[in-house]
Image: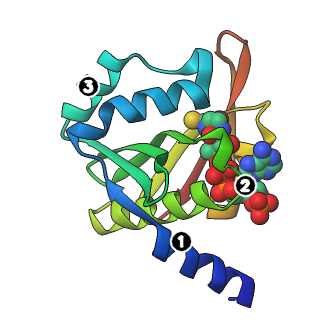
Amino acid sequence: MEATSIRGRAECLETQWVRAATPRDILAIHRLSIDCLESDAWTLEDFIREAREPYTRLHVVDRADAGIVAYALAWLVVDEATVVQVGTHPRWRRRRIAFRLLEEVLLVLAIAGARSCHLEVRRSRAGVRALYEKLGFSVRGVRKGYYRAPADDACVMSMAL
Ligand SMILES: CC(C)(COP(=O)(O)OP(=O)(O)OC[C@H]1O[C@@H](n2cnc3c(N)ncnc32)[C@H](O)[C@@H]1OP(=O)(O)O)[C@@H](O)C(=O)NCCC(=O)NCCS
């Protein structure tokens, strides 16, 4: 690992934690999801219902100086995981926060028994695809017209864990 990455990692450990979300975090996660996903954001009721499901894994990056700045929602069903949503607050982007969060979430999922992980991403979001590719995902197919408002195809990505 190069020196800058080690420094980045040390800064990450000192000032922010990836941790499992608690019920107290749901409101903050919902607000953050609106900042991140706009028209694709879920309602608060969606998050509350989702958080109750036994297959849901909800993690946050909680900074000492700023609180929750990123979240990731995944599912684990038997040995198959799905990354459902990930978001970093607009002010905190491009600092490897989502990358480190998802690295940790994928590790947690693998330890919990996942052997593969899948996700769908808007075809137009090349930056998001680049994030997933950096983590080891690759595009396996395209679902035409999968998204609405705005209309978009979905790239189906997956990786072995
Ligand atoms: C996608 C998102 C979560 C990335 O969060 P982030 O914390 O800024 O991402 P990171 O800094 O960890 O990015 C890691 C790598 O992913 C790629 N990447 C991330 N955002 C990118 C962008 N906007 N453009 C191009 N590449 C991007 C880059 O390769 C980046 O590495 P680099 O900065 O060294 O070049 C954030 O932009 C976001 O919340 N977007 C809106 C919500 C969304 O689209 N979520 C995904 C679908 S649910």
Q: Nearer the viewer, residue 51 or 107?
A: 51
At x 58% / y 54%, what residue is drawn?
Answer: 98
Kindly tell me whether mark 2's CB lies below 8 Å from ligand 1: yes
Determine if residue 98 is in view.
Answer: yes
Q: Nearer the viewer, mark 2 or mark 3?
A: 2
At x 40% / y 44%, what residue is drawn?
Answer: 74
Q: In the image, which disc is placed on residue 48?
A: 3
Which secondary structure, mark 2?
A: loop
Q: Residue furthest front?
A: 65
Local packing at callout 1 (Cα closer than 10 Å; few below 14, some 14-19, many 20+) is some
Q: Which residue is mark 2?
A: 94
Measured as percent of width and height from the top left, residue 99 is found at: 60, 60
At x 66% / y 39%, what residue is drawn?
Answer: 90
Per the model, the C-alpha gap separating discs 2 and 3 is 29 Å
Answer whether labels 2 and 1 touch (C-beta < 8 Å): no
Q: Nearer the viewer, residue 134 or 19?
A: 19
Determine if residue 2 is in view.
Answer: no
Residue type indicated by callout 1: Cys
Measured as percent of width and height from the top left, residue 21 is found at: 30, 47
Q: Which residue is mark 1?
A: 12
Measured as percent of width and height from the top left, residue 131 is found at: 69, 54
Q: Identify the image quadrant of residue 44.
A: top left
